[in-house]
Image (cartoon, rainbow, N blue to C red):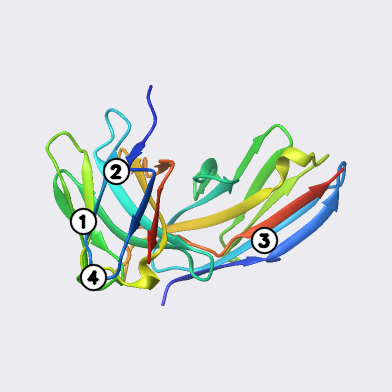
């Protein structure tokens, strides 16, 4: 069965810290991996990683895909209280009954001032 | 460009009733996917519609159904509501072709079943 596992489930840090969120997957015919940030409403898109684009960076956020290890990390440097959210990892693959995004349970990040 | 919109935003129903939720995708997007989000299960895929056809389906009972119209707007219907159907229902749209699978989410419809 296809699955996506994120760790840790929750994390509490102080402003200015650097955090690394992990995502591992087992998906039939992997195509791409996406990271989303969810605050009190709907998830907002952060990055998409594919075989042809295994590293992405935007400001203080960056992400790397390790196809050999079937995993990805999301790094946030110099964290701010506004980074507090649930970070979701999702994978697109083909196989089984879910040909669409398969989500992990998320990592809840709390950044304290 | 306007984002994904969903109506209604909040809904309260009682067990046994049915409900219809609506989603309007980003202009030009032909794929609409529906998800159920609950604290215990996280985000779970319901189904995806592309060009008025259901292209993918998750592991939900037949009480959950949907459709897509020629303008790509989509509706989701849940019949014979159960308490466990209380959740945030999210729809997401994407181009759905050529590897452009990035999905953009609407604000969601929060359904409470009493």
C-alpha span from label 4 to label 3: 41 Å
Element at label 4: loop
Say if A103 sits above or below A113 in the image. below
Residue A101 at least partly seen = no
**Mark 4 vs 2: CB contact within 8 A:** no
Work out which quarter of the rendered image holds the N terminus of chain A and state it.
bottom left
Who comes first in sequence, dot 1 or dot 2?
1
**What residue does disc 4 label?**
B16
Disc number placed over residue A60 in the picture, else none: none
Disc number placed over residue B55 in the picture, else none: 1
10 Å crowding of disc 3: few (<14), some (14-19), many (20+): some
Rendering coords of residue A66 (x, y %): 61, 58
Who comes first in sequence, dot 4 or dot 1?
4
Q: Tell which of A37 and B83 is nearer to you.
A: B83
Q: Nearer the viewer, mark 4 or mark 2?
A: 4
Q: Residue at x 39, y 72 (%)?
A: B84
Q: Do labels 4 and 1 share a chain?
A: yes
Element at label 1: strand
Q: Tell which of A98 and B37 is nearer to you.
A: B37
Element at label 2: loop
Who comes first in sequence, dot 4 or dot 2?
4
C-alpha span from label 1 to label 3: 30 Å
Number of numbered markers: 4
Element at label 3: strand
- Subunit bearing disc 4: B
Q: Residue at x 59, y 60 (%)?
A: A106
**What residue does disc 2 label?**
B96
């Amino acid at each position: 069965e296809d699955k996506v596992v994120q760790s840790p489930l929750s994390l509490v840090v102080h402003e200015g810290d650097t955090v690394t969120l992990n995502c591992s997957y087992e998906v039939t015919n992997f195509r791409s991996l996406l990271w989303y940030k969810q605050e009190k409403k709907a998830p907002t898109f952060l990055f998409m990683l594919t075989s042809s684009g295994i590293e992405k960076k935007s400001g203080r956020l960056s992400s790397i895909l390790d196809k050999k290890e079937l995993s990805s990390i999301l790094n946030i440097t110099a964290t701010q209280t506004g980074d507090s959210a649930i970070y979701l990892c999702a994978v697109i693959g083909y196989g089984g009954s879910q040909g669409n995004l398969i989500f992990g349970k998320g990592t809840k990040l709390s950044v304290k001032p | 460009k306007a984002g994904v919109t969903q109506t209604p935003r909040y809904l309260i129903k009682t067990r046994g009733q049915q409900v219809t939720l609506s989603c309007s995708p980003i202009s030009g997007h032909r794929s609409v996917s529906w998800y159920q989000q609950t604290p215990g299960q996280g985000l779970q895929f319901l189904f995806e519609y592309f060009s008025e056809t259901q292209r993918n389906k998750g592991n939900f009972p037949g009480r959950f159904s949907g459709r897509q119209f020629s303008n790509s707007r989509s509706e989701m219907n849940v019949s014979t509501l159960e308490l466990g159907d209380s959740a945030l229902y999210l729809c997401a749209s994407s181009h759905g072709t050529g590897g452009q699978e990035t999905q953009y989410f609407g604000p969601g419809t929060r359904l409470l079943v009493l």
